[in-house]
Amino acid sequence: MSVFYKNIAMRGRVAQRGPARIVGLVLSVLLLLVLGYFQAPTLGFDFAGIYVVVLIAALPAVVLMGRKSIAALWLFLAVLFGAVVFLTSAPILHANAYYKMLGTETPANFHDALPPIDIEQAPLVSQDMALQAMQKRLSEIASLGSQVAVGTPVKQLVKDKLVWVAFLEHSGFFKWFADGATPGYLVVSAHDPADVKLVMELDGKPLKLRYLQSAYFGDYVERHAYLSGNTTVGLTDFEPEIDDNGVPYYVGTVYEHKVGFSGSESSGIITVNAVSGEVKRYKMGAEPAWVDRIQAEEFILEQMQDRGEYVHGYINLNNEGRLRVDGVLDLVYGSDQRPYWVGGMTSKGKNNGLSGFYFVDSRTKVVRWFKVPSVSQDTAAHAVENVNPEKHYKATNPLPFLVNGAPTYVMALRDVQGVSRAFGMVDMRNNQIIGVADTLNATLRSYQSKRSSNRVAADIGTEAREMAVKGAVVRIAAEFRNNQTMYYITLNTGDKTLGTIFTGSSDLSEELVLTRPGDKVELSYSDSNTRVVGMSKFHNTDIPGVE
C-alpha cells in the first residue's frame, strides 16, 4: 500500500515540475531579451559580455528545472568561462602583450609637438569653466533653462578655432517622453569663456536633437548605433562633436580585443547624426577630417599605465623602472594643430616629479616620448596658487606650452565662484620660476623676468632652438619688476624694423644698462611665436673695450 502512495506522490511532483520548467524557460528567454536590449552586448567570440548575459539569463531555467545535472552543467560552464578569460587575458600571463599595446614610441623633444604660446588665443578655458559659461547662457532663457540640461563639454577644433561643444540634453525621463528632442547645442571659445553661442538653427531650419546620451530606449544614441547593424563590433566612448558646417554628431570608437577578452584597441569610429539618426562606420584612416577623437581616452590611459607597469614583466618586486600616469590625460593641440592625448609619467609610489610625457596622436595613435624630468602638474598648480594664498585662487589643469622656447605649464586661476581672475606660468623643470598676473600678457612679462634672472633656467634649456640676430637698437626702455630692472628692445636689421620685442635683465648682461638707441647689438633668443621674447645672450658691439 505504501508503494502505491509513493508512486502517486512522485507522479504529482513530476506533474508540478512541468509548468515550472515552462515558466523557467519563458523567464530565461524574457531575461535574455531584456538584458540583450539594455546591456547591448557585443556579439563577438572575444567579448565577454554576451557570455555573461547568457549565463545570467539561464539562471531562472536552471533553478526551476530542479535537476542537479542541469545545475552542475551551468556551474561547469560558468567556471569554464572564467578559466578561459583568465588564461587568455590575465596580465600575469600576458604582461608583455599588454606592455606592447601602446605601440612603438619615438623619443623626441618638446619642440616637435608642444605649441608655442599664443597670447591672443591661448586655450586656457577649462572644461568646468566652459560648463559654467554654458549654464549661465542657458539660464538667461527662462523658457529653455527649465526644460533641458547642458551635456558634458568636449574640446575640439572647428574651422581652426579651438572650442568647447556641449549638446542640450534631456533633464529627465518625462522631459524626454514629452519633448522627444532638444533644440540645439552650445559652443564656448577655449580662449574666452565670454564667447558663448547657443546654436538652435542650421541652414535656417530649427535644430531637433533626438539621438542623445540622455534619451531612452531606441533614442539612446549608443543603443541606436548598436541596433543599426553594429551588434558584432565593440562600441564605446561616444562624445559630441560638430563638423565644420555645424552639424551635430555623436562620435563613438569602434574597437576590438588584442589580448584574449581584453587589450582593447581602437579600429575605427562610428558617427551618429544627432538630428536624423544616420549612422556611418569608418575604418581607421578613412575618418572625416573634422573628427578629433578616434583613439578612445580610456584605451590610451590604460595602455600608458600598462607600458609603465610591465616595463620589466609582471613580477618586479623592486619596482625597477616602473612608471605610472600622473593625474588625468589632457587633449592638447600641438604646433601642427593635431590633437594629442598628453600624459605625464612619474615613478611608482609618491613622487612630485615627472620622468617625461607621452604625446599620443588621438587620430593616428603615433606615440612620442619626451624624456624631460619635470615637476608634476599638481606641484605646478600648487606653486601658482601659493603666490597669493590670501585670494584662495584655484588653478585649472596646467597645460604644456613653449614659452620662449622653454617647456612651461600655463593655467588660469579662478576665484571661489569659478570666475577666471588671473593666470600663471611655471617652468616645467623648475617650479621656482613662476609668473602670476591679472592678464596673460602681464603673466608672460613676469615669467620672462624670472627666467631672465635665473641663469640655471637659461642653461638647462639645451633643447631650445636658438635664433641669432644682429641690428641697430631702435628703442630701449626699462621697467622695474620683481625687484629687478627689465629692459625692452626693438631692432632694425638694416632692411626692416622687427616687430619682435626682446627683453632681458641686467643679470643677463651689464651692457643692457649702457645701451642706447642706434647702438649695434647682437643677441640670441629661443624660437617662439610670441611678440615679446626673452633673450638668452646679449652683446653691444658699440661699447668701447668690449669685444
Image (cartoon, helix red, strand yellow):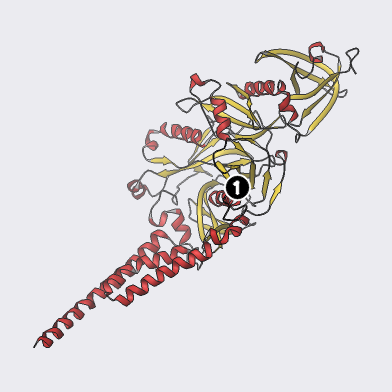
| SS at circle 1 | loop
Residue appearing at x 61%, y 40% in the figure: 332
Q: Label 1 is placed on what type of residue?
A: Arg
Up-down relation of residue 378 to residue 6 (above or below)? above
State the image coordinates of residue 73 (x, y, percent, origin top left). Answer: 37, 74
Q: Which residue is mark 1?
A: 322
Up-down relation of residue 476 to residue 407 (above or below)? above
Is the residue marked by circle 1 packed among few (<14), some (14-19), or many (20+) residues within 10 Å? many
Quarter of the image containing the C terminus?
Answer: top right
State the image coordinates of residue 39 (x, y, percent, origin top left). Answer: 41, 59
Q: Relative to 299, is 183 on the left or the right? A: left
State the image coordinates of residue 90 (x, y, percent, origin top left). Answer: 52, 60
Q: In this view, which residue lies farthest toward the left?
A: 1
State the image coordinates of residue 481 (x, y, percent, origin top left). Answer: 66, 15
Q: Is residue 267 visible?
A: no
Quarter of the image containing the N terminus?
Answer: bottom left
**Foreground: 283 or 392?**
392
Residue appearing at x 39%, y 72% in the figure: 76
Q: Is residue 452 visible?
A: yes
**Foreground: 171 or 110?**
110
Up-down relation of residue 408 to residue 356 (above or below)? above
**Foreground: 158 or 501?**
501
Q: Relative to 113, is 211 on the left or the right? A: left
Q: Quadrant of residue 151?
A: top left
Q: In this view, which residue lies farthest toward the front?
A: 318
Q: Quadrant of residue 147?
A: top left
Q: How many marks?
A: 1
